[in-house]
Amino acid sequence: EEASRLKTSSQQLLKTLSGLAHLNINRDEFNLKNELLSLFEKQHLANHGQKNIQLNLRYLVESEIIYASHFYLLGALQNLLDNAVKYSRPGGIIEMRIQKNEMHAKITVKDNGLGIEKGEEHKIFQRFYRGKNVTTQKGYGIGLYLARKIIGLHGGFMIAKNRYSEKGLMIEINLPVC
């Protein structure tokens, strides 16, 4: 049964990957604050009682509207939150911060989980790459690859930084505001 599930998941991933190469993102008004609040609520309900993780959302912008593909951007953000929960220790803290300047809306996701090894900051965005610290957590090494592709198709970019002093990882998304 597990082999069948893996085969089906792999086939779906490959189909998604091949579709991304030709994907045309249609951008509409996207209420960043409302969508992130909803995403946080769903994440909280999905993980209630499992790891006792605290989710903090810091919204530091006045304008709530950006132009993005609702489906794809939410998928990328959901992946970042899912990863933060998956790799955090029980009782951990995950913070999502939203800031804006003249050019970009910056969304930062910080956790205090496993983190990554020095030199893996770019590798974690490669297809099928799994960090050296990953031992028991399930996954394919495809989520951050897809998230970065989606953000790139929106005209944005993603970076990863290890949080050596606090343990964990910080992922930053920058999306154009116009």
Image (cartoon, helix red, strand yellow):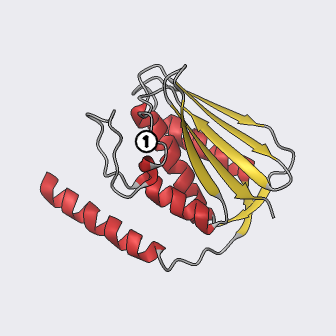
Residue furthest front in the image: 119
Q: Is residue 48 visible?
A: yes
Decide which of 162, 18 is in the foreground and name it: 162
Image-based side of 24 in relation to 48, left or right: right
Q: Quadrant of the N terminus?
A: bottom left
Is 134 left or right of 172, judged from the image as shown? left
Residue 174 position (above or below residue 90): below
Q: Secondary structure at mark 1?
A: loop
Q: Quadrant of the C terminus?
A: bottom right
Q: Quadrant of residue 47?
A: top left
- Give the side of residue 124 with respect to residue 99, left or right: left
- Relative to 146, residue 26 above or below: below
Which percent across, then down, holds residue 107?
67, 45
Residue 1 in view (yes/no): no
Q: Residue at x 49, y 43 (%)?
A: 121
The residue at 42%/53% (across/down) is 143
Tell me if mark 1 has few (under 14), some (14-19) or many (20+) residues whose alpha carbon lies within 10 angstroms of its own.
some
Instruction: Indicate the position of residue 41 as horizontal and vertical percent values.
Output: 58, 39
Which amino acid type corresponds to the residue marked 1 in the rendered image?
A: Glu
Q: How many marks?
A: 1
| Foreground pick, 157 / 99 | 157
Location of residue 26 in the rendering, given as x and y in whole percent from the top left corner: 65, 75
The residue that mark 1 highlights is: 120
